[in-house]
Amino acid sequence: MREIQIAQNKTLKLTNVLARKIEAEEFANLQIVLTQMQNFMKSNNAQPIGPMIQCVKIPGGPNPQPEVYMMQQTTQLIPRMEPGYTQDAVLRVRGCLYAHYTGPMSQSGLASQKLNIFAFENELELNGNVYTIFVNQDDDDAVVDVFMETK
């Protein structure tokens, strides 16, 4: 069943979340980058927990370039980070708009569009940070949760 449910004032809470910024030239080889991330976790005796998370941040100022981060919760904190990786014991983002999308993966961007329209219609200001959680990535039956940070 195709559906997008939305809610206001939700909190995204992630624990032991490992993050890696994805540079523009890495998008063509994203699967390799994600495999490297998995290997980094395993080499530090940590296991992934839950689905992969994509964070897009739009900085302020003229000509803002989106920054894309891939994130993964892990079983434990990793004591020594390699360049390019960061980890937070707890990442808590309050006051978010939230969308729960069910439908074809190719149409999952509609969840973000619906939240943008909802924010516009309700005169809510967004700060440009979007967290997309790929709960289930089947082509025909995807489940995606989107959190948009409000000001």
Image (cartoon, helix red, strand yellow):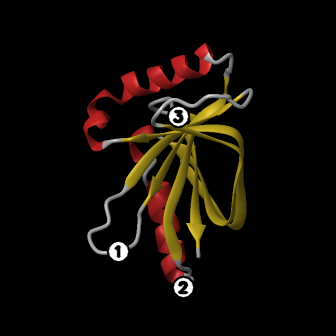
- Image side of residue 19 versus residue 83, left or right: right
Q: What residue is at 52 percent from the left and 17 percent from the top?
A: 39
Residue 77, image quadrant:
top right
Where does label 2 land, which residue?
Answer: 123
Q: Of the residues under marks 2 and 1, which one precedes in the sequence?
A: 1
Viewer-nearest of discs 2 and 1: 1
Task: Locate residue 23: give its quadrant.
Answer: top left
Query: Is 121 drawn above or below residue 134 in the view shown?
Result: below
Q: Residue furthest bottom?
A: 123
Residue at point 37%, 22% (across, down): 32
Gap in angstroms between the C-alphas marked 3 and 1: 38 Å
The alpha-carbon separation of the residues under discs 2 and 3 comes to 32 Å
CB contact under 8 Å: marks 2 and 3: no
Compared with 3, 36 (above or below) is above
Which residue, given by chain and number where applicable, does mark 1 sit on?
61
The residue type indicated by label 1 comes to Gly
Q: Nearer the viewer, residue 103 or 111?
A: 111
Which of marks 1 and 3 precedes in the sequence? 1
Q: Residue at x 67, y 28 (%)?
A: 78
Residue 141 marker = 3
- Give the mark toward the camera: 2 or 3: 2
Neighbor class of circle 3 (other Cα within 10 Å; few <14, some 14-19, many 20+) is: some
Taking depth in this image into account, of 145 and 50 the one nearest to the observer is: 50
Measure how far apart labels 2 and 1 are at the Cα level: 22 Å
- Under mark 3, the amino acid is Asp
Mark 2: give few (<14), some (14-19) or many (20+) Cα within 10 Å: few
Front residue of 80 and 55: 80
In the rendered image, which quarter contains the C terminus?
A: bottom right
**What element does badge 3 sit on?**
loop
- 12 versus 52 height, above or below: below
